[in-house]
Amino acid sequence: MGLREIFKIEWQINTHIKVSRFFYYKMPIGGRFISSTMDRLLLIIYGVELMSFSINVNKLSITHPSGILLGGNGVFSKGRVVIMSGVKFGGRSPNDELYLKKHKEQKVFELGDNVVIGTSSIILGPVTICDNVMIGSMSLVNKSISEPGVYVGIPAKKISEQISYDWVSHL
């Protein structure tokens, strides 16, 4: 890793999440307070609102972090995920039994490998998105996506099976 890598916003956010998760899970006294403070600092500096303890993504790319809400519901992926600016993750209903179950597991949003979420899209969970999915800008995903492809609209509908790996090739 070179000096150039340290100055990338993407690297800084991912490192922040890892350090904050360390404090939250590994330090019994004061760790949760430090983690929470770090997360608020991330909101002030980059405009990304999240709770690091609930973000468990293997390879996450947030290159333009303005106005992103990941929250504390649980974003989970074993693969590569790209999130563009203005993306919001939220729950449909705080009283939904499936939502409450997934919230306890920190997996309200289960994303596959090679998932790209376009600018200003809204994802309402609990949802599962399979591998190789691109969600177009300003789309609303309010149910799970089980087939690879490109999805756009309100609510998101599949418009193409042609996907690109360009967005995740650097991860």
Image (cartoon, grey):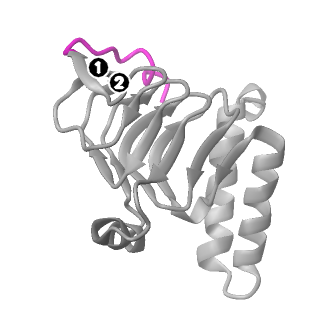
Image quarter of residue 81 = top left
Element type where label 2 sits in the image: strand
Along the horizontal axis of the image, is 6 left or right of 106? right
Image quarter of residue 67 = top right
Q: Is residue 98 above or below residue 18?
A: below
- The answer for how far apart the CA atoms under marks 2 and 1 are is 5 Å
Indicate the position of residue 133 as horizontal and vertical percent values.
Answer: 30, 28
**In the rendered picture of this protein, how many numbered marks are placed on residues?**
2
Q: Is residue 115 above or below residue 31?
A: above
Indicate the position of residue 90 as horizontal and vertical percent values.
Answer: 49, 51
Residue 134, numbered label: 2
The N terminus sits in image quarter: top right
Q: Is residue 75 above or below residue 100?
A: above
Indicate the position of residue 57 as horizontal and vertical percent values.
Answer: 45, 49
Question: Which residue bears the numbered disc 1?
Answer: 150
Instruction: Identify residue type, mark 1.
Output: Val
Task: Depth check: give the residue in front, 122 or 116.
Answer: 122
Identified at 55% across, 35% down, the residue is 87
Labels 2 and 1 touching (C-beta < 8 A) = yes
Q: Is residue 49 above or below residue 156?
A: below
Task: Depth check: give the residue in front, 14 or 162.
Answer: 162
Q: Which residues are magenta?
A: 160-171
Instruction: Identify residue type, mark 2.
Output: Met
Identified at 70% across, 32% down, the residue is 66
